[in-house]
Image (tube, helix red, strand yellow):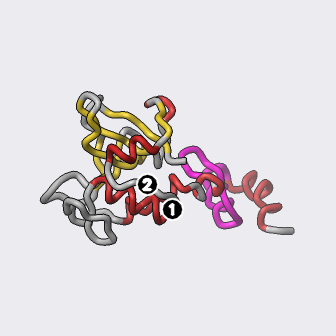
Amino acid sequence: MTALNRVPSLMARAGTASALTIAAVGGSIVAPGLSSEAEAATPATKALQVAASKKGSPYKWGAIGPHRFDCSGLTLYSYKKAGKTLPRTAAQQYNKTRHISAKSRKSGDLVFFHSGSNVYHVGIYAGKGKIWHAPKTGDVVRLQKIWTKSVWYGRVS
């Protein structure tokens, strides 16, 4: 009997909470809020993971990594590591993405901050209203709540 075949009988004896532990030991697990293996393999998810791995890296205007970043440099670098090419500036990146609604946004999508029609900042959507971004001079790459309604969303294809 394989470990996966034992899970149902073990679940009956161990209870639901322990079943998650047993299933995790026996193989992959699907649970609410956890990425599936297929989703984890997407360029958007990879780019998000790359951006998060740069937490604490200093902001430097015009920098594209690997140790310092400006906002669009972080998104360019993160997507490049995920196998996708983006142009250099936030505005150029906005023009290159497929524009989507706030309701359609997913983790890994780009969040573009704008004033009127002028895009001035970009970050990578992390879910729950937060982005990974390189904010400004004197700051570092970090996770932050989206602070304005003046945002557009774009999906890298």
The stretch of residues the image draws in magenta is 15-35
Residue drawn at point x = 50 percent, y = 47 percent? 156
The image quadrant where one finds the N terminus is bottom right
Q: Residues within 10 Å of mark 2 (few under 14, many from 20)?
A: many
Q: In this view, does 16 lie above or below 152?
A: below
Q: From the top left corner, tell me how far across and down residue 41 is, in percent.
A: 60, 58
Residue type pointed to by label 2? Leu
- Give 31 or 139, whichever is nearer the viewer: 139
In the rendered image, residue 97 lying in the magenta stretch gets the answer no
- Helix or strand or loop: what does disc 2 sit on? loop
Q: Is residue 35 left or right of residue 95?
A: right
Q: Is residue 108 left or right of residue 6?
A: left
Viewer-nearest residue: 98 or 17: 98
Count every numbered label the image shows and give the total: 2
Magenta stretch holds residue 21: yes
Mark 1: secondary structure:
loop
Query: Mark 1 belongs to which amino acid?
Result: Ala
**Residue sitting farthest toward the right:** 1
Residue receiving disc 2: 86
In front of the other: 2 or 154: 154
- The x and y percentages for residue 78 are 42, 60
Q: In this view, does 86 lie to the left or right of 66?
A: right
Q: How far apart are marks 1 and 2 (CA)?
A: 11 Å
Q: Is the residue 56 above or below the residue 72 in the image?
A: below
Q: What residue sits right under mark 1 in the picture?
A: 82
